[in-house]
Image (cartoon, grey):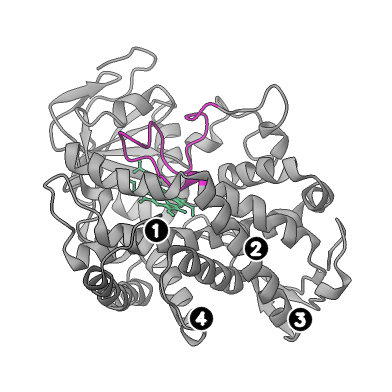
Amino acid sequence: MTSTAHTPPAHAPLVDSTVALLVKGYGWLPDLRRRAGEAEAVPVRVLGRRAVALHGPRAVPFFYDEHNVRREGALPGPVLDTLFGRGAVHTLDGGAHRERKALFLALLKDPERIKDLTERAQGAWDRAESRWAGQERAVLFDEAARVLTRAVHDWGGIPLADHEEADTARDLVAMVDGFAAVGPRHLRALKARRRQEERLAPLIEEIRTAGVPSGQATVLQAVAAHRDADGEQLDTRTAAVELLNVIRPTVAVTWFVTFAAHALHRWPHHRGPLAEEEAYSTAFAQEVRRFYPFAPFTAGLAATDTHWDEVPVPEGTLVLFDLYGHNHDPALWADPYLFDPARFTGPAARTAPDAMIPQGGGDPATGHRCPGEDITVALLAALTPRLARLPHSVPDQDLSIPLHRVPTRPRSGYVMADIDPARHSTGKAARG
Ligand code: HEM
């Protein structure tokens, strides 16, 4: 496929950009593009291999067509051993991918299940508020991870004793936090994944021995019973991997909850409408997903010799798709560094599925777009009004968000003090 809008350099440079990626983090691809005259396809060399970085809505159908870009072999081992797991849906193509993906779509796109999860998350948040009230301070990042860990386990029919909650939340966070790191953060992520796969595998075996009862299956039961395109059940470890691919990213919504707190602290005028107007919470959730940095890009391998925007893309080339840059491109978003939920309200609201792609683009049923977007938005829309109403003060702390760190977050995790749920109010809850 080709297009003619830009004339980018056609060949990969000789110099490898891995160090630049590590140094610049979220700024790496946008910088690369700027230096290539805002080209929508930029040849680059990274991780010792030839690559091309794609940007913009025109490239979404190209990137998400598996005749052009496949996923098998695209993700480096250290990412699989921490974030996604070996044999995960992220690594499959063709019929094998579609069959596995159907499992996720059935569990994650069902409005009744989403409602159940958000209600459980609200219940867990309300119970946690009472705990915070008895503490001098609470770090929202850690607390939100516990709330979501409790909610997703109860929702998914996955046993989790109270005394396991905090450690499990820490592991699930570590798997995300350390996937792109070197050193201790990465080691923590590796150990966390090993521990969590070992925790869940026996649960899969138990369910299989007991048999899945008729009626609506829990997430645990559905994953245990799932049959792949070859008609076989997943081996126990792969089933644990996929169960974690529901649990772990649900807990990762913690990042967005913490970013939401950051936004409410920086721009407190959003507190009132968020606390009081139900419709505002979805627009606010969407703007948090657009504005704050989480997934910088996604990646595949060229499935065949092809080209995009006159840039040759030989088979096997690493193809990167720019997510963070897309959501901050001034050609796509007016004043992109302004935090403005109004972008998502009223007749001019940006609602096209590929207008915003913090969790990937294209059709989630046929491509690799995240199946958890509805859950992410629903959880944020359910929890952030509670955050806006929670009376607390914000002591001195480092709320900066380093863009070289992937994934990043406010450095302090958003420390709250003087938490007093008994004074629940609207709009003017946080002081300091
Ligand atoms: C915390 C917010 C989240 C972010 C930033 C996020 C981001 C992403 C991204 C960037 C992808 C890859 C898209 C691609 O390669 O084209 C993805 C895939 C995926 N996500 Fe999410 N996600 C989030 C929440 C969730 C939730 C809540 C779930 C499940 C409950 C989930 C489950 C998955 C799965 C299973 C895939 C693999 C899809 C496939 O390969 O076909 N994610 N996500």
Residue at the spot 18% in from the left edge and 49% down from the top edge: 228
The residue that appears at 25% across and 58% down in the rendered structure is 225
Of the two numbered discs 2 and 4 in the rendering, the one whose residue sits closer to the viewer: 2
Name the one closer to the observer, 105 or 138.
105
Q: CA distance from mark 1 to mark 2?
A: 19 Å
Q: Name the quadrant of the N terminus.
A: top left
Give the magenta-colored segment's residue range. 352-374
Q: Cα distance, mark 2 to mark 4? A: 18 Å
Q: Which residue is mark 3?
A: 133
Residue 109, x across and y down, in percent? 45, 44
Q: Which mark is residue 288?
A: none
Residue 399, by quadrant, is: bottom right
At label 1, the amino acid type is Val
Amino acid type at mark 3: Ala
Considering every residue shown, the one lying at the far top of the view is: 4
Q: Is tag 1's residue or tag 4's residue first in the polypeptide sequence?
A: 4
Looking at the picture, how far across and down is residue 233, in whole percent? 17, 57
Q: Is residue 64 magenta?
A: no
Which residue lies under the disc numbered 1?
246
